[in-house]
Image (tube, rainbow, N blue to C red):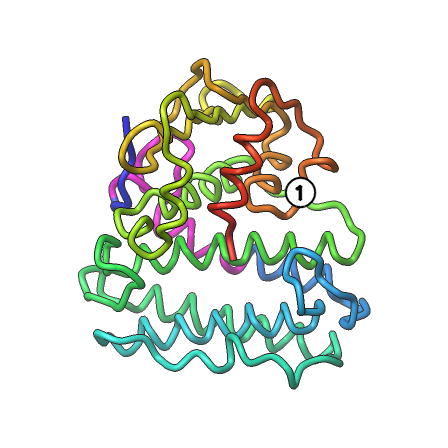
Amino acid sequence: MNHAMTPETSAVEPGGMDFQRHIEEITTQTDLLRATIAGADMTVPVPSCPGWNVGQLVRHLGGAHRWVAETVRTPASTAPPQEEVRELDGYTHEDPAVLGPWLAEGAALLTDALREAEPDVRLWVPVPSLTPYPPFHARRMAHETVVHRADATLALGAGFTVGQRVAVDTLEEWMELGSLPEVLEFHPQQRELLGPGRTVALHATDTPPGLGAEWVVDLTGEAITWRRGHEAAAVAVRGPLTELLLLVYRRRPMAEADIEVLGDADLLDFWLDRVSFG
C-alpha cells in the first residue's frame, strides 16, 4: 500500500498519531529541549546543521513555531515572511536562561493557535498536494521539534531518545514528504534514484510487531513510493528504531550508527544523500 498525506492516514493507521497528540508532542518535545539546553554552552556547533551553533538552532526552531502560529491564525494563500526562521547571524552568543522561556513561549503560541483553529479552515501549505488544514501543520511542527531536539542533544554530547510511537510517525512523515508528486519537479536530481531493482528496507529491531516499524522504500517506478511491511530488498537496514530515525534524517553518520546494513550499501548512501532533510 502506498501512502498519501491525508488527515485520515496520520490519524488512524498503526503507529500513527492524531491531531491532538501532535499538538501535545510539540509541547513535550519543546520541554525536553529546554531541559537539554539548560546551563549548556550555546556556542557549540551543530554538525547536522552546518553553519549553526546550538543557540542559532534553538532560535530557528522557536522562530518556526511562531511562524507557523501566524500561518494558522491568519489563513492566506501565501506564507508569512520567514526572516526570524532563517536569518540567524545575530544569534551567535545566546543565553540559555533567556532561550528556554522564549522557546516555551513560541511553542505555546503555536499550540494555542492550532487548538483554536477551525478544523476545516484552509491554510497555506508548501505544495498543492498537501492537505491545507491544521493537522498538517501540527504534525509537521511536532516532528520538526523532534528532529531539532536531536540536533541539539547530539551536538551537546548527550544521548538522544524518543518514544517509539513518536519515532514511527516522524519516520513516516519524512517518507510521505519525500514521495510527494512535486518532489521530482522541485528536485529533478532525485530522478537519478529511480531504476530497476532499487528498493530499500528499514527494519526496527526493538519494537513490538503491532507498531508496524518495518518499511520498504520503492524506487523502481516513475516516482518514489513507500509501504509498510517486511520484504526482501536490494539493501536492508536493521537496528533500533531511534538509530533508524537518526540515520534516515542524516543526524547520525552511517559509520557511527548502531545498525546492520545487508546488501547494496552504495544504494542506501545514494538514497539518503538525495532525500536528506533540511
Q: Is residue 79 visible?
A: yes
Q: Report the front residue among 195 and 175.
A: 195
Quarter occupied by the N terminus: top left
Where is residue 212? Give x, y as percent: 44, 25
Where is residue 275? Give x, y as percent: 47, 46
Q: Is residue 137 above or below residue 178?
A: below
Q: Does the magenta stretch mainly form a helix, a strand or a loop?
A: helix
Q: Is residue 237 above or below residue 86?
A: above
Q: How many marks?
A: 1
Q: Is residue 47 left or right of residue 268?
A: right
Q: Which residues are magenta?
A: 8-27
Q: Residue at (40%, 42%) from the top-left corner?
A: 17
Q: Residue at (35%, 51%) from the top-left corner?
A: 188
Which image quadrant is residue 102 in?
Answer: bottom right
Which image quadrant is residue 124 in?
Answer: bottom left
Q: Report the front residue among 218 and 5.
A: 218
Quickly name the residue at label 1: 161
Q: Report the front residue among 75 and 184.
A: 184
Q: Report the front residue among 273 and 25.
A: 273
Q: Which amino acid type is shown beneath numbered disc 1?
A: Thr
Tell whether position 252 is magenta. no
| Residue sticking out furthest to the top | 232
Where is residue 31? Give x, y as percent: 62, 61
Secondary element at tag 1: loop
Q: Is residue 207 visible?
A: no
Q: Is residue 72 left or right of residue 267?
A: left
